[in-house]
């Protein structure tokens, strides 16, 4: 039997405290709200008890943040798209920020197992005055466990309507895409870190984010397969290719911490779940 799960999570500012409320249908929920940085930033962990998606499964995640609220969302482990007999496994995430809201969307990686038929969609709507830092990390197979991505397809869709669209389909049979130096060049992890604003960001502020990213890139073993750019006045993006997840995630965490300090004068507050 396929799983169909839905979650709606909303953040509100109540007496200078960010409060999270949610409702769910099926095996998808939020753990207890945590406040390691004080009342203004609410940390939440999104949990999918089955641990992965097979053909026919659908996860729908809807997140809203109101004026003055600041939420940080992560997951306790990787999302997993398992082998399918032909049906699609779909995860859809929609994030909507009202004016004056902040959100950090920091799920751990999505792993595409050989034989999966998977689609992962992320849509972000940011009102003027709102800001978001988020990332998306995808692993094709488990190379270190001798489980290569040999069959199946994966479609990734990241969109800020009217501003930014990244949409690509990876077929395990497309060896030119996977192996070519103008494709993935043999790498099996793709990652993007992005800052999205609802209003044009001053050039000096965007340049500061790019400088932080490029300084950390220079010290990274992924220097030759990563780059940072600001293709629009409301967007800054760091893109990374890596042989496996760990070095990509390490780089993204470093840049995320530098960006939140630069943008919001917040220290590096690593979610507690990452240490377990």
Image (spheres, grey):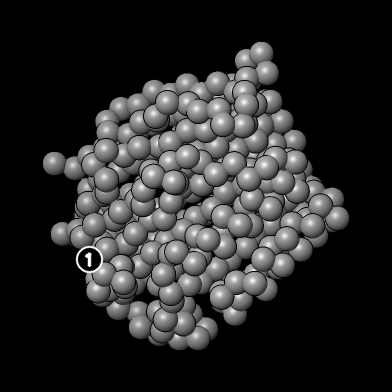
Across and down, in percent, residue 175 comes to 35, 83
- Residue nearest the observer in this picture, 39 or 138: 39
Compared with 174, 258 (above or below) is above
Residue picked out by circle 1: 115
Comparing 241 with 167, the one in front is 241
What residue appears at the point 62 percent right and 15 percent down from the top-left corner? 14
- Residue 153 rendering spot, x and y as whole percentages: 31, 66
**Label 1 element class:** loop
Residue 149, horizontal then vertical, whole percent: 29, 72
Residue 99 as seen in the image, left or right of residue 116: right
Quadrant in the rendering for residue 198: top right
Question: Does residue 10 appear left or right of residue 141 in this picture?
Answer: right
Tell me, yes or no, if residue 125 can be seen here.
no
* Residue 271 visible in this rendered orientation of the protein: yes
| Residue 43 higher or lower than 165, as above or below | above
Quadrant where the N terminus sits is: top left
Residue beneath the point at 68% across and 46% down: 260
* Residue 212 lies in quadrant: bottom right
List x then y, in percent, for residue 49: 27, 38
Going by the picture, which residue comes out furthest to the front? 275
Looking at the rendered structure, the number of numbered marks drawn on it comes to 1
Q: Nearer the viewer, residue 98 or 49?
A: 49
For the point 79% across and 47% down, the residue is: 200
Task: Please state, as top left, top right, bottom left or bottom right, where the C terminus lies in the image.
Answer: top left
CA neighbours of label 1 inside 10 A, class few (<14), some (14 to 19), many (20+): many
**As drawn, is 28 to the left or to the right of 204?**
left
At x 35%, y 37%, the residue is 47
Front residue (pair 191, 126): 191
């Amino acid at each position: 039997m396929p799983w169909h799960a839905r979650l709606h999570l909303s953040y509100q500012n109540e007496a200078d405290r960010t409060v999270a409320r949610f409702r769910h249908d099926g095996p998808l929920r939020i753990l207890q709200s945590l406040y390691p940085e004080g009342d203004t930033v609410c940390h939440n962990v999104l949990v999918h008890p089955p641990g992965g998606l097979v053909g026919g499964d659908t996860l729908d995640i809807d997140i809203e943040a109101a004026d003055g609220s600041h939420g940080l969302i992560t997951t306790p482990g990787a999302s997993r798209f398992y082998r399918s007999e032909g049906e699609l496994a779909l995860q859809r995430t929609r994030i909507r920020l009202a004016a004056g809201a902040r959100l950090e969307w920091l799920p751990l990686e999505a792993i595409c197992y050989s034989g999966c038929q998977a689609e992962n969609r992320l849509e972000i709507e940011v009102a003027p005055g709102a800001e978001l830092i988020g990332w998306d990390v995808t692993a094709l197979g488990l190379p270190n466990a001798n489980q290569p991505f040999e069959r199946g397809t994966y479609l990734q869709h990241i969109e800020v309507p009217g501003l930014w669209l990244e949409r690509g389909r990876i077929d395990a049979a497309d060896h030119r895409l996977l192996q070519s130096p103008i494709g993935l060049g043999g790498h099996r992890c793709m990652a993007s870190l992005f800052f999205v604003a609802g209003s044009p960001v001053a050039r000096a502020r965007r340049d500061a984010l790019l400088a932080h990213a490029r300084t950390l890139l220079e010290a990274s073993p992924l220097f030759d397969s990563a780059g940072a750019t600001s293709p629009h006045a409301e967007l800054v993006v760091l893109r990374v290719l890596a042989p496996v997840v760990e070095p990509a995630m390490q780089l993204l965490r470093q840049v995320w911490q530098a960006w939140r300090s630069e943008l919001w004068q917040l220290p590096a507050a690593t979610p507690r779940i990452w240490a377990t």
